[in-house]
Image: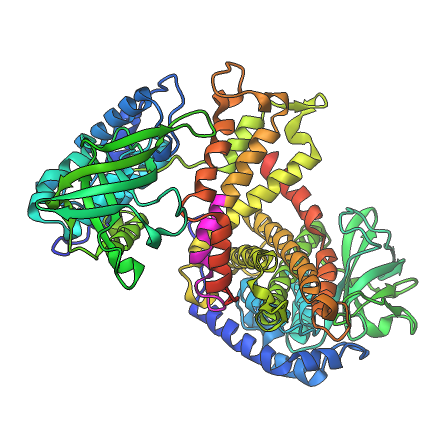
Amino acid sequence: MNSAVNAPSQTELDEFRGQVAAWLKDNKPTDPGFLLPQTFMEVGSDQQLDFLREWQHKLWSAGYLGMAWPKEYGGQGVPPVFQVTADAEMRRAGVPIAFNVIGLGWAGPLILHRGTEEEKQKYLKNILSAEDIWCQGFSEPDHGSDLGNVQTRAVRDGEEYVINGTKIWTTMGNYAKYMILLARTNPEAERKYDGLSFFLSPMQVDGIDPRPIQKLTGEYGFTETFFTDARIPASCLMGEEGEGWKIAMQTLQYERGAEAGAAGGLMQVRVVIEDVIECLKGVTRDGRPLLEDPVIRDELVKLMIEEKAQGLSNKRAAIQALTSDYPLSLNLSSKLRSSEYARRMRKFAVAAQGAHGGLYVGDGDALDAGFWQRAYLNNFSTTIGGGTSQIQANIVGEHVLGLPK
Amino acid sequence: MSNELSFSDEQAMILDSAREFCREKSPVSAVRALLDSESGFDSATWEEMVALGWPSLAVPEEYGGAGLGFGSIVPIAESMGRALLSTPLFSTTLAAQAILRAGRPGHKEQWLSQLAAGTPATVALLDGGDWGVENTSCAATRDGDNITLSGEKWFVADAGVAQVFVVWCELGGESALLLVERDQLAADAIKPHTLLDETKRAARVSFEGVSVAAGQLLDAGKADAVLRDLRLLGSLLVAAEATGSTGACLDTVVDYLKTRKQFGKLIGSYQALKHPTVDVLCKLDAARSLIYHAATLLEEAAAGAELDRDAEVACRMAKAQAVDALTFAGDRAVQFHGGMGFTYECDAQLYIRRAQYSQQQFGDAWHHRTRLATLLLDAA
């Protein structure tokens, strides 16, 4: 949408990069004294929410969020490469996440690309400013990995739709003002996908009841969202009835970041193996530094090799001559490889701590305030959510290697 | 670290033509036909490889080579591994690198151009079974203009056909690299090993009493550094070859899983077989990224320049990952072929044997991870 804008020169970009770095240096929040979420799926307390809301608002006010979105909707109207540059600087500076992820990376770009003028006016700016929090209502309790089978019903009644059903794993469902909702308007459709419709649904409505789910970490961050004869305006329907599947699939492509239309900002705090090493530096085993133990060293180096290979594989994926054997391999296995690596790396980070590994968040003696214990448990959201690793392995086996179903 | 992974059009062409060549010259029937041959390779195929310029790719133009970087050999090594094609290419390439890196005035003109023209050569490094030792029992003594050796070397690859040996020995308490010609060895000096991998050839070579002109000594000041680099370059060649073999092994497994039925179903539909096969793919993908990362770093280095820390890390990571990937793939390939997998006739045996042999060459995965730990965990 910025095709009219000329691409910036390298000098302009370098200058901009310097500006962002300087701003981040001056404005990076100090340690709030409690553990911040690493991802938007971990916002479990009002304290965390208020902190992240303020940070995102600050980021946007400074002009470093939604940069490629048009000015009239709260953006800057500049080429996406500026946002990509700003994001890279945020990563480098290690600042907190831009937490309103479903708004910034899913609903926002969708509304920008196919919403009405009224919808753009109503929603976009408040997504960027963190005024309105958005959540996503795709998954259902009985259909974890099978999105096409969504059973929540939406029945047209005059100028309203009546919604009945249950959604699960609604991130920040208890804080959200709006939900992108996938519901079934036509149970008789020949193909199950054709019976689905897509709504920009308000959350503060009678009959919508988001109940927080306590995670294995003991914290919150998701809700199970119950719809009981909930009435939402018919104008909430996006596109036509029956286009729900197509639109839901469209939202997935924005995951690729600002270049694809997302507003930008960090979606998660990146954790790397050097962080694990840093944490383990003071740990001893048999009275000697743990990092001198040959078994531990071998395990660490295995993880370092794997992490290095992941980064290199992302680069190799763009080189056609080096992906010709199984062209889909690196892209389709990316989620499986990265989430499983992250899980094993965090598991190791806890297991190698000695007796400290048995402490948890809240214990003043826990290493890194219990960060690794919590991170390990939370990481299962990536090996389970969005299709479990076992489903991913089926997908890779069948679609990359051509193995039978 | 600006360029961690790139692949030039020239490298892509090398990869394309090498894959095509190896596929054509080395179908599995040809591999099997050579298993009990003396040399282990087809001399006509080797001559064609020489004609294609493969032994001279990383030799500077002034000595009759193509003047490319060492990274250009990686796609060839991968392609050869994929077709289980063995020739004296790796041995000759490493010997040429030794001469390129440590040759004294006259050495390169005399020897390097011969090797580039296809005279097989090899490196003689190991005393026994330990790739990690820092000294050798192969001793050299100087007597006027002559140097006399004692001791023997193990696992000298392609010793049976090599015309030139680069021998790691100790002279006056220091490491030295000495060039020895085939006709300077005793008649019974070469005793072939019986190798687990029947596609490979290596031998015990006795250098006892061998006396050569002192002029055949490579630059003594560079011996330690070049020895280290030879081991790293050898590791990368084996890693690239093993990565190719893993790819071929995976294809073999996938073919079987798509055609073999048990209990009325194609066995590939069972997740107990499907998921580990995906693991093979993921390990292979990691290995492939790492070997081409190492190739990228070496391609950018000046010819014959000492490997820097990043290149060392890259070669060691590539070797550790590639041989672990192949060891896993070969092991599962036998198992997943069921009763067939237990037979000599089944190709899975070729891969499981190649896997354990590659694991050992130029240091196993533990060897490299131990050194990586020092590089990565103890720095600063």
Residue B300 in picture, x, y percent from top left? 49, 58
The answer to whether any part of residue A248 appears in the image is: yes
The answer to whether any part of residue A13 appears in the image is: no
In magenta segment, residue A121? no
Kindly indicate the quadrant of the structure image that contains residue B250. bottom right
> In the rendered structure, which segment of residues is drawn in magenta?
A323-339
- Is residue B278 toward the left or the right of residue A11 in the image? right
Residue A89 in picture, x, y percent from top left? 32, 37
In the image, residue A90 sits, relative to residue A340, either above or below, namely above
Colour option used: rainbow
In the image, residue B305 sits, relative to residue A307, either above or below, namely below
Q: What's the residue at 13%, 49% (across, down)?
A: A115
Residue B273 in picture, x, y percent from top left? 61, 59
The number of numbered badges drawn on the structure is 0
In magenta segment, residue A327? yes
In-front residue for pair A155/B223:
A155
Kindly indicate the quadrant of the structure image that contains residue B61. bottom right
Question: Residue pushed farthest bottom?
Answer: B44
Residue A318 in picture, x, y percent from top left? 40, 60
